[in-house]
Image (cartoon, helix red, strand yellow):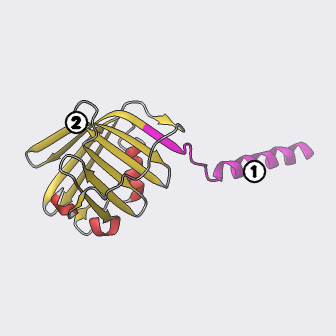
Amino acid sequence: MLAGMMLVSCGVKKKVTKSEPSEPTWHTCLIQGARATVTKGAESYSANVTMQTVRDSMLVISVMPMLGMEMLRLEATPLELTGIDKIHGQYAQVSFADLNRQLKPALNWDVLQQVCAAELPTGSERGRLVFEFNGDVIEVVIEYPARKLDVPVRVTNQQVTRYRKVDVSRWL
């Protein structure tokens, strides 16, 4: 009878352990050399992309279409997005709430963090997102190389004072 009670109690312990929530598996994520293709109507643009993420805090996406020069930078926090067009000297800031008034399906911090950590449900080698903005369909396809977890990342905010502020709808 004692042996039977021990077996039952061990089984209960195992079940309790399995139902506990799991801890996040990473704190920072760095993906270098990803390839992003954005298609809007008949137009399609491709570029190399570096994505740096600090879990639940901030992320930076650097778009470098040629020679490793950053031409476009997207910074995000759980509340807002800032896009900096370094070629044309302009930037746009928008909250997720304001962006989602025109964007379908809604984009939120969790989805953006999944994109930048190669954790989309579509897999860790290729991600695909499709949005509609003001009647235009925008498709984003990202081909991911290997990601590096828990490595130092540089996610400091870019100073936007030298850029001209524009409405985000001009970019989409």
Q: Is residue 119 visible?
A: no
Where residue 27 sits in the image (x, y, percent)? Answer: 54, 45
* Residue depicted at x 71% and y 52%: 16
* Rendering coords of residue 38 (x, y %): 20, 44
Looking at the rendering, which quadrant does residue 32 occupy? top left
Considering every residue shown, the one lying at the far left of the view is: 42
Residue range (magenta): 1-30
Callout 2 amino acid: Pro
Can you see residue 143?
Answer: yes
- Location of residue 65 by image quarter: top left
Residue closest to the eye, 5 or 29? 29
Mark 2: few/some/many CA within 10 Å (<14, 14-19, 20+) = some
Q: Is residue 48 magenta?
A: no
Residue situated in front as seen by the camera: 86 or 137: 86
Front one among 40 and 159: 159
Classify the position of the C terminus by image quarter.
bottom left
Image depth: mark 1 or mark 2 in front? 2
Relative vertical location of residue 137 with respect to residue 26 in this rendering, above or below: below
Q: Residue at x 76, y 49 (%)?
A: 13
Q: Is residue 7 magenta?
A: yes
Q: Which residue corresponds to mark 1? A: 12
Placement of 121 over or under 101, stated as above or below = above
The secondary structure type at the circle numbered 1 is: helix
State whether the magenta stretch is mostly helix, strand or loop: helix
Q: Position of residue 67 (x, y in %)?
A: 24, 30
- Residue carrying label 2: 65
User: What's the distance in space between the residues labelled 1 and 2, CA to CA?
Assistant: 56 Å
Per the rendering, the mark at residue 62 is: none
